[in-house]
Image (cartoon, rainbow, N blue to C red):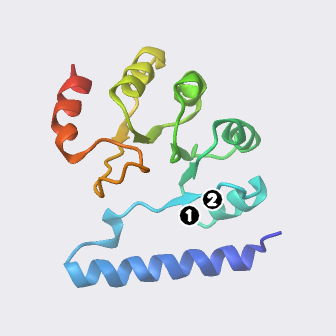
Amino acid sequence: MVVATDIGANIDQVRERIARACQRVGRSPEEVTIVAVTKTVESSAIATAFELGIRHFGENRVQEAVTKIGQLSGLKPRPTWHMVGHLQTNKAKVAVEIFDIIHSVDSIRLAEVISRRAERTIPILLEVNVSGEASKSGFSLAEVEPALEAIAR
């Protein structure tokens, strides 16, 4: 079980690191959005982080997110929920219903499925395999521009 003081200390540490990094590059820390990835974290710990000012949360499993988002539905303002893991096309229907943004879209087909299933505009982030390793998913660098054009249609 994670203790609230530990969560607060971790959040403070992250904010301090962000402030130092922003200072080095001449940016404002307010330009940075912290997305707390909460896979395997209990809903009570997420609620504590919310009370401490975190408003964006990331989950990598659709079914686990359904449970947590339901348990935390009373939080106001509503948190922004990010799908941060690999999304299978067969889980896209549920994902577009519960997430506000979907990271790691790794194919045009998945983007099309998301578009068809969503009853609203949902932001997506493309996963790009910059290393070129066959074991990694995502668009190759050469595929990014054509993929953007196809998805924009």
Q: Residue at x 51, y 48 (%)?
A: 84
- Is 24 situated above or below 105? below
Quickly name the residue at label 1. Answer: 53
Quickly name the residue at label 2. Answer: 50
Percent x, y of residue 130: 28, 55
Q: Quadrant of the C terminus?
A: top left
- Is 123 situated above or below 22? above
Q: Residue at x 57, y 74 (%)?
A: 11
Percent x, y of residue 114: 44, 24
- Is 28 situated above or below 66? below
Residue situated furthest front in the rendering: 134
- Is 11 situated above or below 70? below
Relative placement, left or right, of 40 versus 135 is: right
Classify mark 2: residues with Cα within 10 Å, few (<14), some (14-19) or many (20+). Answer: some
Name the residue nearer the viewer: 98 or 114.
114
Name the residue nearer the viewer: 54 or 128.
128
Percent x, y of residue 19: 37, 80
Quadrant in the picture for residue 123: top left
Alpha carbon of mark 2 to alpha carbon of mark 1: how far?
5 Å
Residue 27's label in the rendered image is none
Q: Residue at x 72, y 56 (%)?
A: 40
| Number of numbered discs | 2
Q: Residue at x 31, y 63 (%)?
A: 31
Percent x, y of residue 59: 60, 48
Amino acid type, mark 1 = Gly
Do residues under tags 2 and 1 come within 8 Å of each other at their CB atoms? yes
Amino acid type, mark 2 = Phe
The secondary element bearing badge 1 is classed as loop
